[in-house]
Image (cartoon, helix red, strand yellow):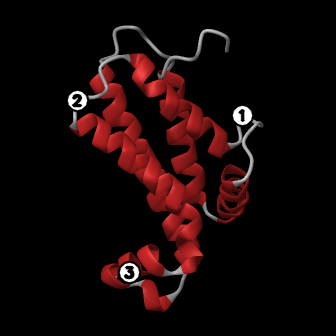
Amino acid sequence: MAYHPTDSVQDLARDLSGALKAFHRALIEAEAGGDPSLENPYSRLFAVIGDPRFAWTNPLAQLILQLDERMAQGDISTTEDLLPFREKVSRILGEDRTGGGEDASFRLRYLIALQNSPDVALATGGLRRMLARLPKLADD
């Protein structure tokens, strides 16, 4: 489904947030693997917060937090307000090859999870479909 000008900006922002959260959840599940010490939701939460194995997912968690905060504050009123989020997600998914540093590190770990987990593949598909609903920059 491609971007349609009648899509509500708030709906787009909410749907993007939901797709990002599903993607984040799938990455965490993939990283946790079959570790029996992480079966308890509280153990998993504390691991995501403090275990270095999960630190690579922090940029995605920060992006979700930024989007949700801006939505809560009413700071997203036009589709242009969503463009920075679209650009960041495109970079971490590897659609924009200019990303380096933190994006490259995330992308490497993401690709490993993508190869090992069907849930990550499904969440990636959902996120890509969501990105297709967002407008692109004029020069894209």
Q: Which mark is residue 21?
A: none
Q: Residue at x 43, y 43 (%)?
A: 19
**Residue 62 visible somewhere in the drawing:** yes
x and y percentages locating residue 136 in the rendered image: 57, 17
Q: Is residue 50 above or below residue 103?
A: below
Label 2 crowd (10 A; few <14 / some 14-19 / many >=20): few
Amino acid type of the residue that numbered disc 2 sits on in the rendered structure = Gly
Whether residue 38 sits left or right of residue 115 in the image: it is left
As drawn, the residue found furthest toward the bottom would be: 37
Whether residue 102 sits left or right of residue 49 in the image: it is right
Gap between marks 2 and 1, in whole Å? Answer: 28 Å
Query: Which of the marked residues, 3 or 2, is nearer the chain's N terminus?
Result: 3
Query: Which of the marked residues, 3 or 1, is nearer the chain's N terminus?
Result: 3
Helix, strand or loop at mark 2: loop
Amino acid type of the residue that numbered disc 3 sits on in the rendered structure = Phe
Q: Quadrant of residue 111?
A: bottom right
Q: Are marks 2 and 1 in contact (CB under 8 Å)?
A: no
Label 3 crowd (10 A; few <14 / some 14-19 / many >=20): few
Q: In front: mark 3 or mark 2?
A: 2
Q: Residue at x 29, y 43 (%)?
A: 69
Query: Which of the marked residues, 2 or 1, is nearer the chain's N terminus?
Result: 2
Q: Is residue 5 above or below residue 49?
A: above
Q: Which residue is mark 1?
A: 96
Q: Is residue 105 above or below residue 79?
A: below
Q: Which residue is mark 2?
A: 74
Q: Which residue is mark 3?
A: 46
Amino acid type of the residue that numbered disc 1 sits on in the rendered structure = Asp
Q: In front: mark 2 or mark 1?
A: 2
Label 1 crowd (10 A; few <14 / some 14-19 / many >=20): few
Helix, strand or loop at mark 3: helix
Q: Residue at x 34, y 15 (%)?
A: 7
x and y percentages locating residue 81 in the rendered image: 41, 23
